[in-house]
Image (cartoon, rainbow, N blue to C red):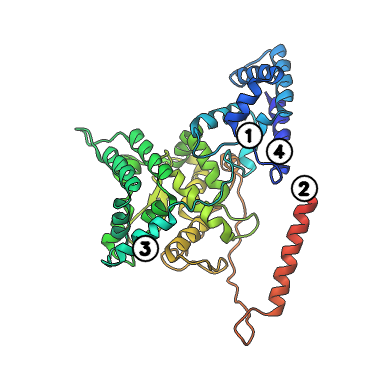
Amino acid sequence: MLQVGIILLLSHSVDFLSANSVEPIDCILAEEKCLKDSPCSASYDDYKNCSRTDVMDQVNSVKCKEAAEVLSQNSVMQCKCQRMRREEHCLNIYWALHPDYVHGYMDSNDSPYVDEKVDKKGANEHARLAAESDKYSETNNCLKEANICSTNSRCSRYKSDYVMHCATMDPNGSCDQQKCHHYLREFFKKVPLEFTKRILFCQCNQESNCAERRRKNIVPECSFEEKVKRNCLELRDTCLRNNLCKSRFLDYQKHCQLLKKKDRCPQENHSQCIQSYIRMIGTVMTPNFINNSTMETSLWCNCEGSGDQEDDCKNILSMFTSNKCLKSAIKMELNNSNAIDMDSELENPFTDKDSVPPVFQSINEVEEGRTMQVLPVKTKQASNTASGGPSLNTALTLLGTTLFIVLKVMLSI
């Protein structure tokens, strides 16, 4: 299947170059269209059979190669998925079409999902309910957000569903984690983001009761914690065997990574990063806050017994514990501010004094043990004019850099 994988990887590269000009077709619609076309339908069936074959004779190898060539010219290979419309069915189609160059795909920093606009639904409703709540001035911000949720019928109903299923324990003190995760995903999928993100990232101002409520929002005893912490490599491998988890993990990697060769996270990525982080909740790689004193997040795993893969394991863990892009996105949610200096050290509770392992390598690099050099961050002092504004040199430098990037992108298309 190596030749088949190479053909599809090349076709994916062509799709990537045209991604800015052509919106990818939904995989469910693309499959329906392909099945109505005889050559495409036949090749589609052949290729799905090929992807399930571990050992093939020469005849099958040629047949699979021909099927891959036909599909590479069809829009079905350019399809992606939406997060609301039959998501899991769409992802099953997507990964049936992309099994042979998964490793190459992991390196591409792409996602099976269509890039959607930031979800602002529910903002006005939340603002109205928050204004009414302010009349009673809650000192516990997380309690206030919980009360706001309870006064919205949709938020209240879906939260009650997951709390009920996540808090139900059997006689042995265990819960049905799979069912708990399902209802958590339903909550974050069906309830407007303006409500869910404020519940997760409510500001506590060092108040322990507030922080404890924040940490327990997702009922961590069931959704997050397990009796024994698994190795992070095992956790990741379990995720990669599930199409939904694998897809959301890739989406998280795409939107919560630092720019290559630059230890910074563009501010425009913050909202997408927050959304992709939230979508990890309800998968086997569910993250959560680790205590009440900080806003540090982590997976429920460790790197004991990793052997010669210990560095790889730590890299996976660092995607949540030492991810400056995620930290700055959370900080923006907490401060409700549009201005964050990404070149300065993050203030408490985000101070990161220890050396940080590589935050975002591709999954391939993690698996093969390759590492990226992480340079120390230099704090820049902004030079201002007497009037308090940026200097002319700074403005010209920013303008020149922007024009260079635009020209480079245009020439590369």
- Disc 1 marks a residue whose amino acid type is Cys
Closer to viewer: mark 3 or mark 1: 1
Q: CA distance from mark 3 to mark 2?
A: 43 Å
Q: How far apart are labels 2 and 4 at the CA level?
A: 11 Å
Q: Position of residue 136 (x, y in %)?
A: 26, 66
- Where residue 82 appears, as percent x and y from the top left, is 54, 39
| Residue 114 image-quadrant placement | top right
Residue 142 higher or lower than 179, as above or below: below
* Numbered label attached to residue 15: 4
Residue 131 appears anywhere in the view: yes
**Which residue is the site of mark 2?**
413
Q: Which marked residue is nearer to the observer: mark 2 or mark 1? A: 1
N-terminal of the two: label 4 or label 1? 4
Q: Nearer the viewer, residue 123 or 58?
A: 123
Name the secondary structure under disc 4.
helix
Q: Mark on residue 79? A: 1
Residue 254 horizontal/vertical position (percent)? 58, 47
Q: CA distance from mark 3 to mark 1?
A: 40 Å
Amino acid type at mark 2: Ile
Q: CA distance from mark 2 to mark 1?
A: 20 Å
Tell me whether the residue at label 3 lies in contact with that at label 4, contact meaning CB atoms closer than 8 angstroms: no
Relative to 286, is 309 on the left or the right?
right
- Is mark 4 in CB contact (under 8 Å) with mark 1? no
**Taking 318 as reference, is 331 above or below it?**
below
Q: Are marks 2 and 4 in contact (CB under 8 Å)?
A: no
Q: Which image quadrant for residue 61? A: top right
Report, in whole angstroms, how far the alpha carbon at label 3 lies from the one at label 4. Answer: 42 Å
Please, what is the three-letter code of the amino acid marked with disc 3? Gln
Between the residue at mark 4 and the residue at mark 1, the CA separation in whole angstroms equals: 10 Å
Counting residues from the start of the chain, the first of labels 2 and 4 encountered is 4
- Disc 4 residue type (three-letter): Asp
Decide which of tag 3 and tag 1 comes sooner along the chain.
1
